[in-house]
Image (cartoon, helix red, strand yellow):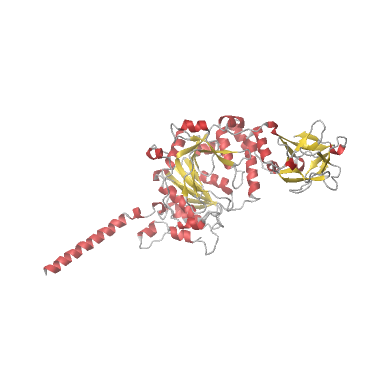
Amino acid sequence: MRRNTRFLLLFAVVWISCVLYYFYKSDNSEDLVNKALKLKDVDEDNGGIKSSASGKQFPLEADFSNDKLKWQYFDEAAYIVKTKLQSGQDAFARNKFNQAASDQLKSNRDIPDTRHPMCRSQTWKQELPQTSVIITYHNEARSALLRTIVSVLNRSPENLIKEIILVDDFSDDPDDGTELAKIQKVKVLRNDRRQGLIRSRVRGADAALAPVLTFLDSHCECNVHWLEPLLERVAEDRTRIASPIIDVISMDNFAYVGASSSLKGGFDWNLVFKWDFMMVQEISKRKQNMIAPIRTPMIAGGLFVISKSWFEEVGKYDMMMDVWGGENLEISFRVWQCNGSLEIIPCSRVGHVFRKQHPYTFPGGSGNVFARNTRRVAEVWMDEYKNYYYAAVPSAKNIPFGSIRNRLELRERLQCKPFKWYLENVYPELKVPNKHDFKFGIIRQNNFCMDTLGHSSGGTIGLYSCHGSGGNQEWIVSRDNSIKHLDLCMTLADEVDGSSVKLTACNTASMRQKWLLQQESKMLKHQYYDLCIDSRSHHSKGLTANTCDPSSNSQLWDFVTS
């Protein structure tokens, strides 16, 4: 009897312990899961989804099964498996990065803390403004998009994230976004047609409720304490744009690699963004404080924080730019020239997947879109220095760029500084070419002008009645003795008398592309051969290079600058 009593007592103790452990685990279940994936309340914001196409609101679908975690948390695996690669499918085809590698990673994977050690002992102001995080995407890999959202929620103080606004730029599958709208703080706006990154960002900014905007790309991972230092700098001065150091996430295997903290943004005269190492004087000065903010002439454009009121006051984005490209130049020039500033904050780190090509199409081709956008930048903000851009990218002069009246009025209203001020005070290390290094103009013989006749690379050059409107008759004579039309150079086909003169891709090392424009004799003579440009056979062969003869009228030319 006594033995049975002891057995029953032992059984009761074990049973009570199991019950208590069950309730303990239930109460602490959130500590065992990815907190960023917590679902909204069923009726919160009607699912947090809005559609510009029809106003349709999509219902929140929660899994109210017996398992508490299943109905409280977003089902990451089910979301990602819907776009899983099939056997033998190219992992790079859809997104131009390794989707298989991305899909295999958890949305809350650990990444290395790449900050300077001094950052780890920094404290940030307690009273910081909330931010609306705006992420635009078009057919983004679900795993990469989800990982971006999770990194924002898991590595930011909860009270500082007002909302995450996803702007779906008319992706093929609306469910890429509608499913994510179940997650806490996530809202989705879907465009009813392709608008591109620039207009999509403005739509997200217009809908934002927080006083500070944070723009991120859709394939990022925010690092620990990435947000506080950015918000602190903007809170101190509303005219600042603050950008993190952008770490590298490998497009091949998604390894997270820390980037140098000695870089700042810049550009060449072709208006293509590049990273510059700091000047020696800057590096020396920073030895006193290695984590001080870095003044940068240019931001990469994908990741930055800005006051919403300043964003609106300084002109948002140029809404007549298309798709993608050049918007970082435009906002950088505009903010600096209109009394703002740009900074890179070393204690803020965000990883980004850098790809070698775009996974989506550009209406009219990516080259034309980029040229149109950058030409708008040059025409509005660069004053006479735009000619250096056209000298570097002659083809841009033939790209229509639309009306810029509103942007010029904005510049006048804000009383923005000239581009000369920007070069002298913000980017003095950019070498300004000598204005005598090149000349634009026409090459004339009586009433006829040298004309490409619409020919492309390998084609001949002819004569056509001068029309004065540039186009096929516009040439650049540069200091290196090349004569260019767009990106093609006047080239001697052979080193013999009567050789054809053709258009070929410019090559500064090519001896056959060197010509001397002789002002006194009015002859266009080859630099290394006694051959001059001649029009005698232009009806049958195009322009040729014949033995120089000062008495021949067919070898006399006038260069008229434009």
- Nearer to us in this view, 255 or 329: 255
Q: Is residue 317 visible?
A: no
Q: Position of residue 122 (x, y in %)?
A: 39, 37
- Nearer to us in this view, 557 or 40: 557
- Nearer to us in this view, 3 or 170: 3
Q: Position of residue 95 (x, y in %)?
A: 55, 55
- Please identify the quadrant where the N terminus is shown: bottom left
Q: Which residue is painted at 55% across and 51% down in the image?
A: 169
21 vs 485, left or right, is left
Q: Is residue 558 above or below residue 371?
A: above
- Nearer to us in this view, 279 or 62: 279
Q: Residue furthest left?
A: 2
Q: How many marks?
A: 0
Q: Position of residue 523 (x, y in %)?
A: 81, 35
Q: Is residue 500 above or below residue 173?
A: above
Q: Is residue 264 above or below residue 6?
A: above
Q: Is residue 234 visible?
A: yes
Which quarter of the figure has residue 558?
top right
